[in-house]
Image (cartoon, helix red, strand yellow):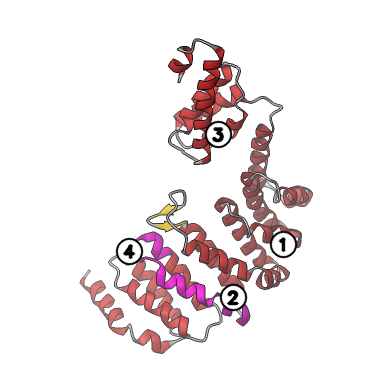
Amino acid sequence: MIRAIRACKTAAEERAVVRKECAAIRASINEDDQDYRHRNLAKLMFIQILGYPTHFGQMECLKLIASAGFPEKRIGYLGLMLLLDERQEVLMLYIVGLALCALGNICSAEMARDLAPEVERLLQFRDPNIRKKAALCSIRIIKKVPDLAENFINCAASLLKEKHHGVLITGVQLCADLCKVSSEALEYFRKKCTEGLVRTLRDIVNSPYSPEYDISGITDPYLHIRLLKLLRILGQGDADASDRMTDILAQVATKTESNKNAGNAILYECVETIMSIEDDGGLRVLAINILGKFLSNRDNNIRYVALNMLMRATTLDAQAVQRHRATILDCVKVSEDI
């Protein structure tokens, strides 16, 4: 790029080269290309030195600063010094994010009461990174001061409609924690949010391949698990809520691959949820069959959790567990051989 710019004989030629480079950098930013992020920022710094606008790349500085690698951090901090000053809004977002992280880690009950309204406001902020940090901070606040839970119910419910997975997963966790400390929140989410959560889980289960969220061929297993845990809380003791989630639980149980750890983690949470909600027995048989497959796994950890779950299942459907008696006996023989 530098050679191309220096080879220009007129200002118009230089502007054309810079425009082309900026367009390529914008496309790379939109695609969230992490491999070339530090190179793009290095180019932007040179373009900034030449006097051209580079405001569209300011957020890349913060992303590089948050990277694990030293070369990326170095370029990120260098870009921060060159592309931003104290008047830039992006820098203020960085400061707000740090403040939320600090508050989420060290806030006392008194601090929580004083700053809860401000954190609640930031749950609706336009930047997704700030919303995510505000949700994490809200979890700390309601754990410190459960009386404040009612203030966060509506904001937490709005986070469940997010498309950004980082915000969505923290929003789901916030709702789960609200349900644990507030019966009002539990009833609200049961009535207003169960169908939306089921729809979100269905979209993830049926989503096409996405490299940004893919782990072992499964789209965002962490979000899968958080959604299943929240559905478990909402379905426990409530027949109507349980009935609304039976179809998607059956779909998760039958469509999730069990040959990778990510898939096994989702299946385990799915079984936990099926065992916890109000069900007529059909789903329970499916869940116990999954545990039977777990018993045939070579990994002793997977066998262990399956046996623990089967012990609980005997109180719910002893007949279904009996079908796997031979597999359980095989496990005993294997342990004796060891």
Quadrant position of residue 332? bottom left
Mark 4 crowd level (few <14, some 14–19, many ≥20, 10 Å Cα): few
Q: Position of residue 180 (x, y in %)?
A: 65, 67
Which numbered disc, 2 or 3, marks the residue that appears first in the sequence?
3
Q: Are marks 3 and 1 in contact (CB under 8 Å)?
A: no
Res 235 label: 2
- Distance from disc 2 to disc 4, alpha carbons, whole Å, reads 28 Å
Amino acid type, label 1: Ile
Q: Quadrant of the image for the C terminus? A: bottom left
* Secondary structure found at label 4: loop
**Circle 4 is placed at which residue position?**
259
- In the image, residue 259 sits, relative to residue 210, either above or below, namely below
Q: Which residues are magenta?
A: 239-265
Mark 3 crowd level (few <14, some 14–19, many ≥20, 10 Å Cα): many
Q: Which residue is rendered at x = 34% and y = 77% of the image? A: 292
Amino acid type, label 4: Asn
Res 60 label: 3
Of the two numbered discs 2 and 3 in the rendering, the one whose residue sits closer to the viewer: 3
